[in-house]
Amino acid sequence: MNAPLRIAIAGLGTVGTGVIKLLDESGELIAQRGGRPIEIGAVSARNRDANRGVHIDRFKWWDDALALAEDPDTDVFVELIGGADGIALQAVMAALRSGKHVVTANKALIALHGVELARLAERHKVALRFEAAVAGGVPIIKTLREGLVANRISRIYGILNGTCNYILTNMEATGRDFHAVLSDAQAQGYAEADPAFDVGGIDTAHKLAILSSLAFGCETDFASIYIEGIENISAHDIAVVGELGYRIKLLGLASMTEHGVEQRVHPCLVPLNRPIAAVDAVTNAIVVDTDKAGRIVLEGPGAGQAPTASAVMADLVDLARGHVHPAFMVPADRLKPMSPSPMEHHVGAYYLRLTALDKAGVMAAIAEDLAEEGVSLASIIQRGAEHLETVPIILVTHECQESVMKRALARIAAHDSIVKPPRMIRIETL
Amino acid sequence: MNAPLRIAIAGLGTVGTGVIKLLDESGELIAQRGGRPIEIGAVSARNRDANRGVHIDRFKWWDDALALAEDPDTDVFVELIGGADGIALQAVMAALRSGKHVVTANKALIALHGVELARLAERHKVALRFEAAVAGGVPIIKTLREGLVANRISRIYGILNGTCNYILTNMEATGRDFHAVLSDAQAQGYAEADPAFDVGGIDTAHKLAILSSLAFGCETDFASIYIEGIENISAHDIAVVGELGYRIKLLGLASMTEHGVEQRVHPCLVPLNRPIAAVDAVTNAIVVDTDKAGRIVLEGPGAGQAPTASAVMADLVDLARGHVHPAFMVPADRLKPMSPSPMEHHVGAYYLRLTALDKAGVMAAIAEDLAEEGVSLASIIQRGAEHLETVPIILVTHECQESVMKRALARIAAHDSIVKPPRMIRIETL
């Protein structure tokens, strides 16, 4: 057996601890498969004495991740600290500069600094790898970079955040509203204490930025992603769209259009008969539309200690096997700048929910606004009263351009009889 | 850019022609991504002058695949001839012996001779790769060998033959019988003129042998796979199981049991609410149950010129990137012998279709046979008459051991009132 691959782990939270456990349980098997043992030499974390359920006395301890990054006995620096900037970024840069491979699960870091870090890695002839940053144990990064390497990709989309999918699934199952389900999810550990990154769509957008860069050969461009979270989805929306034959999912979607790359994260109405509509709870699913291999779908647990550790280990075994190639498939300098297509160019159908005064002429006025802007309607549901004086009106449009829809909505919102800001959810036929 | 990876293609049928077309269309992109151009140097085929829609004059021509295998200007021998033995096997052995990497789409070859070829490849320090042998453009081999490398797999199963899935889907959609749909599929090119390999389950078993070896770290053992095809599935079965909440799929399944590895290929009743029940037409889907990454599902077109060429090219790009490791993840000499669990040990529920004389006491006799053997019933459907004198009886059992089921069936078949051999289809709850 060859010499071990020596790794240093920065960050001993859920994932870092998971990597230690995985090597404790399956280290021998992994060594056989990878052709070399993978050995943890040194670690660092905020708190040396936290109760993690694993012994860390056997590893060299560093108080400082930056010092750990420069540990001379390390081949691979495993960054599991998190956060796009600060110590994670500094430590990864230090590790690359000192000629160490880097493996990270940090989606924010890669979404925001991935290209610059890839360039640094190439300069030092080391690898930067981040399978664990997207979709937990589902090997989507490897699939894009290697399995589908001969393909041009026209679109990639998926359910990339388990917390949101859990909340939406649970809202549907229980009929409860967003905030009630979120509190429960927090209590059960499915949602962070500060849920803004998850439910606000930021986490999905970080992952989409990475997938989009790999799929289209462009630099990551998080800033150009259109982002909307699930905070405004109501129990009423979920019930109504079910009757219309849809389910609401938070999707990240990136597609190559005539105007450039359209990258967007928002709740979508997905037809019930589409496979992605059936992806429940914390499962992630990614659909890749390719020119040669056709439509490829990957699905599996999108987070969690063991799945994420499995992905980190896949990267480490690749390095043990000597696989070093550009992080984003082509050298960083050959990535094209992202040419984003603004949301105004987006074309799709829309679900609208209006709250109107219950009086004659309201529907006629709305219909006239839509008709004058060139938006045609596929269906209208008006039924029952929300309060004594208002009624909910549900509209489903045919496809139109987003800019047109926005103009029509602004006109509708301006009527005195529309008493709340209209809600709009995009429909994806997929 | 580095020196090209020089390949020789033996066999210019659908897939071989597809590889040429793919390099013509996307060669530059592939070179950027792989870091080196991939160049076809030489080719061989049965007929030099066949009309393939691509020019082959630009390549060196060999009449003989064996001579091509020893072409001194070749880095990788691409075997796309097909067939488990004969010229394909000889040429692959010759190529490995002369120090060339081999890429093949030949599932029969790998299922029957994979381990011996892997050993030969290791001895000559070259790679043997076969991503295209299973599930077309779906990167399942890479996923098992690399993406899930840190996992112990307890079960792998899937829809691995597009022809069978197309026929079953079409039988359900049209209500027609097996032979009518098969003839249509042949006319449309979805089934071979000699369909025995596909509809008889052999093709699925070849693929399962490969997946099973990778999943469990065992030598391939095609001979121990239990195989049943779809030839005896009737339109009546398909209609009845639909009412019972099932769909019939031909699955290949391999699982680790207390008795060893159970490998089987047969039609299955799959509950309609399982994702695999929704996989239609020529799509393939593979489900992998792992200890760390959870349940991972891959899905996509399982055959066809472009998807298969995409998989061949993925292997070639890996070789261009210098990735050479054991074909079955661990060195061939470390693979354990397969320890097969015989079908008698299989435990599952069963669907039975009996054709009985329409007279008193038949049902009681059947029920008594089942009870005495210890098989308990979940449901019974007896309805209408098939002919003047016979009735179909549909039974669904609870779980029992296959040997028990077989004994009970033999008793039932022995009654004079049972006028046709009983039909049995296994139920997979998955």
Image: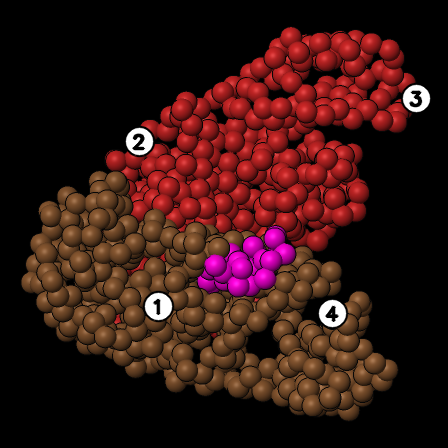
Chain colours: A red, B brown
x, y percent for residue B263: 49, 77
- Which chain's residue wears label 2? A
**Label 1 CA crowd tier, 10 Å (few <14, some 14–19, many 20+):** many
x, y percent for residue B151: 47, 68
Residue type, mark 2 in image: Lys
Q: CA distance from mark 2 to mark 3?
A: 57 Å
Nearest to N terminus: mark 2 or mark 3: 2
The residue beneath circle 3 is: A388
Quarter containing the C terminus of chain B: bottom right
The residue beneath circle 4 is: B386
Q: Is residue B29 left or right of residue A359?
A: left
Residue type, mark 1 in image: Lys
The answer to whether marks 1 and 4 sit on the same chain is: yes
Q: Is residue A248 left or right of residue A322?
A: right
x, y percent for residue A50: 57, 60
Q: Nearer the viewer, residue A259 or B329?
A: A259
- Mark 2 or mark 4, whichever is nearer to me: 4
| Magenta stretch: helix, strand or loop mostly | helix
> Residue at point 86% right, 20% down?
A390
Q: Which residues are magenta?
A: B160-183
The residue beneath circle 2 is: A336
Q: CA distance from mark 1 to mark 3?
A: 69 Å
The residue beneath circle 1 is: B107
Name the quadrant containing residue A72: bottom left
Q: Nearer the viewer, residue A364 or B219?
A: A364
Q: Nearer the viewer, residue B40 or B269?
A: B269
